[in-house]
Image (spheres, grey):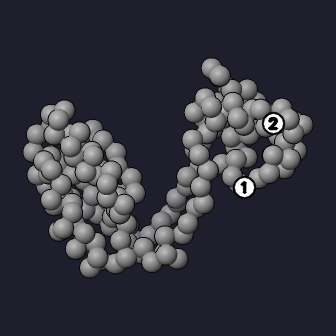
Amino acid sequence: MESIDKFDLSILQELQADGRLTNAELAQRVGLSAAPCWRRVRALEEAGFIKGYHAEIDRHKIGLGVLAFVRVDTERVTNDATLKLEDAIRKLPEVVACHYISGTGTFELQVVAQDLDSFSAFARQHLMNLPNVKDLHTSFSLGEVKASSAWPLGHLAR
């Protein structure tokens, strides 16, 4: 699958909005019969457009009230050192996102914790002891204005 058409785009939009749709519901919403809709969904999955399905959980409801943004500065930027740091970061479940960044710093992490005390303990025990870390710069979310796991798809309709 090299490109997507209007039906594929509609399928992606509908599944981003509600990943629990049955194939029959999805087919009706996108204007296809069930069998072609199912084949298109499978093709989108196999081509890697759809990576998986998950439940979106409210972090506050499960007691994770702190969201921190942590910029990690490294001692040196070599391939081996960077790979070791990446591997160590992947092993920390509290780190819910990690981006290799341009500008000041090497990585930008999103870290969740129950409260400031637990974040502080996590930072001291884990983040400060990551391999090749020179410095950490932390900012805390004071409130979410927008948080979405849905990607904008308008550019695909052109």
On residue 20, the disc is 1
Q: Is residue 134 above or below residue 76?
A: below
> Which residue extends farthest top?
2
The residue pinned by badge 2 equals 37
- Quarter of the rendering containing residue 40: top right
- Quarter in which the C terminus is drawn: top right
Q: Amino acid at mark 2?
A: Cys
Q: Dot 2, how many residues are within 10 Å of its Cα: few (below 14), some (14-19), or many (20+)?
A: many
Mark 1 and mark 2 in contact (Cβ < 8 Å)?
Answer: no
Question: What residue sits 69% from the left and 52% below the top?
Answer: 19
Question: What residue sits 59% from the left and 46% below the top?
Answer: 52
The kind of secondary structure element at disc 1 is loop
Report the label total.
2
- Quarter in which the N terminus is drawn: top right
Q: Amino acid at mark 1?
A: Arg
Question: What residue sits 87% from the left and 39% below the top?
Answer: 34
Does label 2 or label 1 sit earlier along the sequence? 1
Tell me where residue 30 appears, x and y as whole percent.
82, 40
Tell me where residue 76 appears, x and y as whole percent.
10, 40
Tell me where residue 5 appears, x and y as whole percent.
73, 26
* 88 left or right, relative to 133: right
Tell me where residue 17 appears, x and y as whole percent.
69, 52
Q: Is residue 96 above or below residue 12?
A: below
Q: Is residue 81 above or below residue 122?
A: above
Question: What residue sits 76% from the left and 53% below the top?
Answer: 21
